Amino acid sequence: MLINKKLPITYILKNVRAELTYVFIISIGVYLLTHLFKESVPAMPLTIPTFIGTAISILLSFKLNQSYDRWWEARKAWGSIVNDSRSLVMQLKSFIGPEHQFNIKTIAYRQIAWCYSLGQNLRNLNPTDNIEAFVSEKELLSLQKHHHVPLVLLSNQSADLTELRKNHQIELFSQFQLDNTLVRLCDSMGKVERIKSTVFPVTYRIFLQFMIYIFVVTLSISLTDIPFYFEIPLLIVISGVFFLLEKTAALMQEPFSNLPTDTPMTAIARNIEINIREILGEKELPKPYQMGTFYLD
């Protein structure tokens, strides 16, 4: 997640360098055509690129709103994961006696592993990385054989609660409350997976970019009276704003793509780990994740 207001100019330009290169080439081509074939090229009223620019602004506004909604929904889902992860461990401590501390710690640590694993899975990374400290070696080997590791971890949580109930270590009502918390965690997992698997229409982006290039061509023809050394930079700056907004929307609509604009799932999972270990009464706690150069992972 981008958190530093002073973004590196290299990061900004890197995202639109291809588009700006095309604009530069198109601008030179249109400039040469309008001056070599000045009599054949009709005059272009400035109202035409103005109209196209207004249409682009409306389309960009719609796309930015839709992209931010997807990003914010992803962040809200992870906010629910934070709350339910805390609730699960507090319920465990409340419903299970202190003499069963090992069972409480096993389930609590598996919940930490689930948070890290879910973030890795959403980013198409190995979901069993960085969870070896929170599950047993036997369980880790078993998880490596499965495709959907976070789902198996939740299933193991449910199985442990069922075993506790069979051994009369928790009451039926307590198991019911804990199962409800697991259901909410499963719902949150389903929400983020739905966002991940729902693709924003590619044709919308292609059409929008095509409109921006048409805008550049018409504006270049309209500015025939402006000197070359002023016209080209002006076209690059104006179109660059449009392309940056379009690229921002394109990045925000994919909140689990392992980019600086991502939902900071690793940092959230680390905060959940700290919270859970505090609830367990542990003293040696890891430090929260710090941002890199300009974003939080």
Image (cartoon, grey):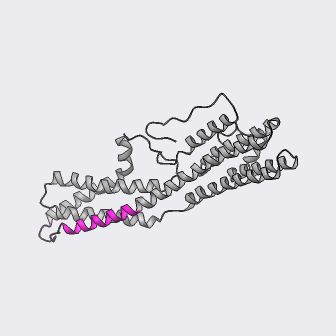
In the rendering, at what x and y percent does residue 89 appear?
70, 42
Q: Was residue 36 drawn as part of the magenta stretch in this picture?
A: no
Label tally: 0
In the rendering, at what x and y percent does residue 24 appear?
27, 54
Relative to 37, residue 174 above or below:
above
Relative to 181, residue 136 above or below:
above
Q: Quadrant of residue 281?
A: top right
Q: What residue is at 65 percent from the left and 34 percent from the top? A: 278
Observer able to see residue 120: no
Drawn side of residue 218 relative to residue 136, left or right: left
Q: Quadrant of residue 128?
A: top right
Drawn side of residue 65 relative to residue 127, left or right: left
Q: What residue is at 72 percent from the left and 51 percent from the top? A: 154
In the rendering, at what x and y percent does residue 244 appear?
35, 53
Q: In which quarter of the image is residue 130?
A: top right
Q: What residue is at 11 percent from the left and 70 percent from the top? A: 39
Q: Hey, which residue is sitting farthest right in the picture?
A: 167
Q: Hey, which residue is sitting farthest top in the picture?
A: 284
Drawn side of residue 98 relative to residue 180, left or right: right
Relative to 182, residue 110 above or below:
above
In the rendering, at what x and y percent does residue 111 appear?
69, 44
Closest to the observer: 76 or 219? 76
Q: Is the magenta stretch mostly helix, strand or loop?
A: helix
Boundaries of the magenta span: 37-62
Q: Was residue 48 drawn as part of the magenta stretch in this picture?
A: yes
Drawn side of residue 189 relative to residue 155, left or right: left
Observer able to see residue 175: yes
Q: What residue is at 45 percent from the left and 61 percent from the top? A: 66
